[in-house]
Image: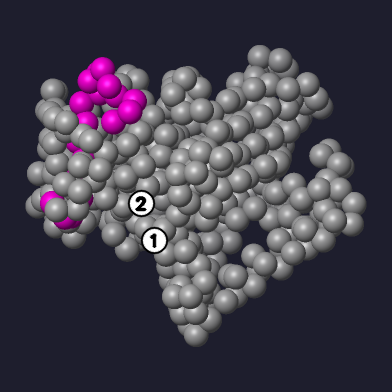
């Protein structure tokens, strides 16, 4: 940024949203020594005051800025080193803030899992971000920090143990407990709406390398999980709804790191559903359920029913008890070209969509503000390529995540 000593390290933009309130509480509980200078922001001064009162903030400033007000957003960005945004669906509300950050040199991170919007932002604003020095990092929640940093962690261990990275990595969701995210559902619905009338977008959404730089050169055909028996895990597996965004972020990390994972790197994600007939039945139900939901979202009458009567809405999510009792457990199995194998595990101690996501985004923002060398260029990064080991250390220390190597 042009300003060397901004008023704030971090601004929580969208502090009145469901996840924004959780983040505000986490920041209040975590940054007690005032080593991080932070503020909250949103479009409504009265709602910001309500959140401040509910959390018990003292001395934390409130900034009013609507997502459509470019002047107000520019004034907000001029006061901080980093903006972390929870205002989604980002394809509907996120364009102007990214534009302002890219132009002004303000660093930025968010929770989006919308690949079509990320690609649009890259095309429109990466040149400006490189010029201004702004570091833009999307996908800093459950999608896609555990996957992106999980593969990064595995590859670093592979280099230590085998002297080469893994050309093939499988991630399996062993356990995932937590309430459905209304914000995530809204983002998926909006993406399906966009794709329904746009053939080019439908083709883009089928491209596993859609978020990679244009000159990536990757041609390896990626495996698309439907339903199968996985011998390595001795279990049936089914599609994982977050795989579409997670895999694209992982492939972008490979491209940005100079093809560290290999030019023909293979990566897939799936959910473990169990052994025997019960596991097979669960895998089939998961596949059919996901397929039916996506088809239903594409049909306006069914979509209306899902939006208004069945699925959680933006701002809705699990209560404090569900967040506390939630968890996730991801296992990564990699193999090098020479046949060396390595197995790692990433776990979280809160529900993935809100409790853990709030902690991950907050620590990503602090990492962005505190840990990145000043000479690091601007542009559109991934969590792994910009923050890597530094963020893993923060997540272990402050976010209830573990990164462990296991015996193969």
Where is residue 227? Give x, y as percent. Answer: 78, 58
The residue depicted at 82 percent of the width and 39 percent of the height is 233
Q: Nearer the viewer, residue 52 or 141?
A: 52
Residue at 53% x, 81% y: name it. Answer: 302
Residue 147, quarter of the rendered image: top right
Q: Quadrant of residue 296?
A: bottom right
Residue in the picture at 46% in, 28% down: 399
Q: Quadrant of the N terminus?
A: top left
- Whether residue 316 appears in this view of the structure is yes
**Residue 39 covered by magenta stretch:** yes
Which class describes the residues within 10 Å of circle 1: few (<14), some (14-19), or many (20+)? some
Which residue was labeled with disc 1? 314
User: In percent of the image, x 65 and y 37: which residue is there?
Assistant: 330
Residue contact between numbered discs 1 and 2, judged by CB atoms under 8 Å: yes
- The image shows residue 313, relative to residue 132, as above or below, that is below
Q: Secondary structure at mark 2?
A: helix
First-in-chain label (1 vs 2): 2
Check residue 18 in the rendering and tell me which mark sits there, or answer none: 2
Magenta part of the chain? 28-45
147 magenta-colored: no
Q: Is residue 254 above or below residue 373?
A: below
Q: In the visual, does 160 lie left or right of 274?
A: left
Q: Position of residue 7 (x, y in %)?
A: 12, 28
**Label 2 neighbour load within 10 Å: few <14, some 14-19, many 20+:** some
């Amino acid at each position: 940024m042009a300003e060397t000593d901004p008023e704030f390290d971090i601004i929580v933009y969208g502090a009145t949203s469901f996840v924004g309130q959780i983040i505000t509480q986490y920041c209040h509980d975590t940054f007690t020594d005032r080593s991080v200078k932070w503020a909250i922001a949103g479009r409504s001064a009265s709602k910001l005051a309500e959140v401040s009162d509910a959390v018990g903030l003292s001395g934390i400033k409130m900034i009013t800025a609507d997502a459509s007000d470019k002047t107000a957003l520019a004034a907000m960005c001029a006061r901080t080193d980093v903006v972390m945004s929870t205002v989604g669906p980002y394809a509907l509300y996120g364009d102007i803030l990214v534009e302002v950050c890219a132009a002004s040199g303000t660093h930025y991170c968010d929770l989006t899992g919308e690949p079509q919007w990320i690609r649009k932002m890259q095309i429109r604003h990466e040149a400006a971000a490189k010029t201004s020095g702004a570091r833009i990092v999307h996908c800093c929640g459950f999608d896609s920090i555990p996957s992106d940093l999980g593969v990064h962690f595995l590859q670093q261990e592979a280099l230590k143990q085998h002297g080469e990275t893994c050309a093939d990595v499988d991630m399996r969701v062993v356990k995932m407990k937590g309430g459905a995210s209304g914000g995530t559902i809204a983002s998926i619905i909006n993406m399906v709406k966009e794709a329904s009338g746009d053939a080019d977008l439908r083709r883009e959404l089928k491209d596993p390398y859609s978020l990679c730089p244009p000159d990536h050169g990757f041609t390896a055909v990626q495996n698309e999980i439907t339903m199968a028996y996985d011998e390595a895990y001795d279990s049936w597996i089914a599609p994982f709804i977050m795989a579409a965004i997670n895999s694209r972020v992982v492939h972008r990390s490979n491209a940005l790191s100079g093809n560290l994972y290999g030019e023909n790197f293979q990566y897939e994600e799936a959910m473990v559903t169990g052994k025997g007939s019960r596991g097979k039945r669960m895998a089939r139900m998961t596949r059919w359920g996901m397929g039916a939901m996506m088809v239903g979202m594409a049909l306006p009458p069914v979509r209306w029913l899902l939006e208004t009567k069945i699925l959680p809405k933006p701002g809705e999510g699990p209560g404090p008890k569900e967040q506390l009792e939630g968890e996730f457990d991801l296992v990564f199995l990699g193999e090098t070209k020479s046949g060396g194998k390595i197995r790692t595990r990433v776990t979280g101690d809160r529900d993935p969509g809100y409790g853990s996501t709030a902690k991950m985004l907050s620590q990503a923002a602090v990492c962005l503000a505190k840990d990145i060398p000043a000479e690091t260029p601007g542009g559109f990064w991934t969590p792994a390529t910009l923050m890597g080991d530094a963020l893993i250390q923060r997540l272990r220390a402050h976010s209830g995540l573990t990164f462990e190597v296991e015996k193969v």
